[in-house]
Amino acid sequence: MEKNNLVEKPKRIYGERTDFAEKVLSEELGKRYIEYRKKWVLASKREVVTDFSLYIQIEHTGKCNLRCPGCLQGNASLRQNYSRGFTPLDLKLYQKILNEAKRYHCPSISFHNNDEPLLLNDLETRIKMAKQAGFIDLIMTTNATLLTKERTEKLLESGLTKINFSVDTYNEQDYKKIRIGGDFKTVLKNIGYFMTRRKKMGLQLPVTRATCVLSKFTYKDMKEFQEFWEKRVDMVEFQNFQAIKGYTEELAPPGTKIDSNFTCLAPWQQLVIRANGDILPCCSFYAAPLVVGNISKDSLYDVWHSSKMEKIREELLKNNFSFSPICQACAGTFYTL
Ligand code: SF4
């Protein structure tokens, strides 16, 4: 049945996450979503350590079909080290995660990290499983190259609440430099079909967002990117560039500086689980060795309250990154315009 209250005009956000999505999701999901967002704000201020992680991010494969120059997947040695020998996260382990998350009423889950979720053939089944386990906010980021009509139909029925299209540009010429292995026209067609089908089905969810990392390729064209994509999706978001130390610094926009005010919030907000079961305190691509547990033997609750997590929070609260070479590298590679 079609709804009448469709979002007719695309909205945008610009450099911040105060959010059109919040409005739609509050309307669609109600009180539990509003309560979760209040807790999220407190956690983001690092004022509370909630009883259980508010957000679980799952990297089901660790692989990507593109080879973009700003990403670890674009460098052969980084890529191989990152997910060597990985197979998709075992379904039994995934169910174990969901069971525990259900017990603690975890509100939010995503299906990507430094990988492309549509490489996973049963992604939509896994999203449905998460929905059945009680998650209310179900999120994915995709490069949209594999977003075929068939995948669109399945995703729209899966219970997904947010989908981010990591496109970075609004034209074919730049796309060829930024998204190696993709095709701009295909991406445009895929996203167009997704939006048309969502409208035809009378849905407001998933809320859609086009994202752009501000690299040397993109920083000059923010206005054009915004004008192009706000006609096509619900929201537009720009993200500051983070370099992979020793590999991608030259992609930073000219004249930009390292952000000396970087503050890390992640260990108050989330746990990340990788395809090999490793549990991490954040989604940074630096954090693959920052292992705080493994889902095959540890409970997420225990990891969340473990001495390792407490130590990380304790140091980050002092804005001391030098306690870990991983955090030090991560914190020293964010650029601001
Ligand atoms: S500073 Fe450390 S914990 Fe924070 S995002 Fe970076 S690697 Fe993760």
Image (spheres, rainbow, N blue to C red):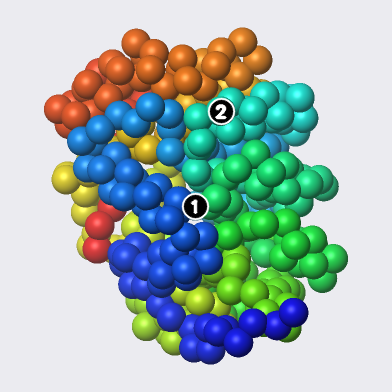
The percent coordinates of residue 2 (x first, y second) are 70, 83
Residue type, mark 1 in image: Gly
The percent coordinates of residue 105 (x first, y second) are 51, 36
Could you tell me if residue 277 is visible in this image? yes
Q: Is residue 35 left or right of residue 45?
A: right
List the residue tagged with mark 2. Answer: 103
Front one among 97 and 215: 97
Residue type, mark 2 in image: Arg
Q: Is residue 79 left or right of residue 71?
A: right
The residue depicted at 76 percent of the width and 24 percent of the height is 92
User: Please, is residue 204 above or below residue 268 in the view?
Assistant: below
Identify the secondary structure beneath mark 2.
helix
User: Please, is residue 326 above or below residue 16 in the view?
Assistant: above
List the residue tagged with mark 1. Answer: 70
The residue depicted at 39 percent of the width and 13 percent of the height is 306
The C terminus, quarter of image: bottom left
Dot in front, 1 or 2 = 2
Front one among 238 and 30: 30
Q: Is residue 321 left or right of residue 157?
A: left
Front one among 251 and 182: 182
Q: Mark 1 vs mark 2: which is more N-terminal?
A: 1
The residue depicted at 58 percent of the width and 74 percent of the height is 204
Q: Quadrant of residue 114?
A: top right
Q: Is residue 290 left or right of residue 296?
A: left
Q: Quadrant of residue 152?
A: bottom right
How far apart, in angstroms, are the residues tagged by discs 1 and 2? 38 Å
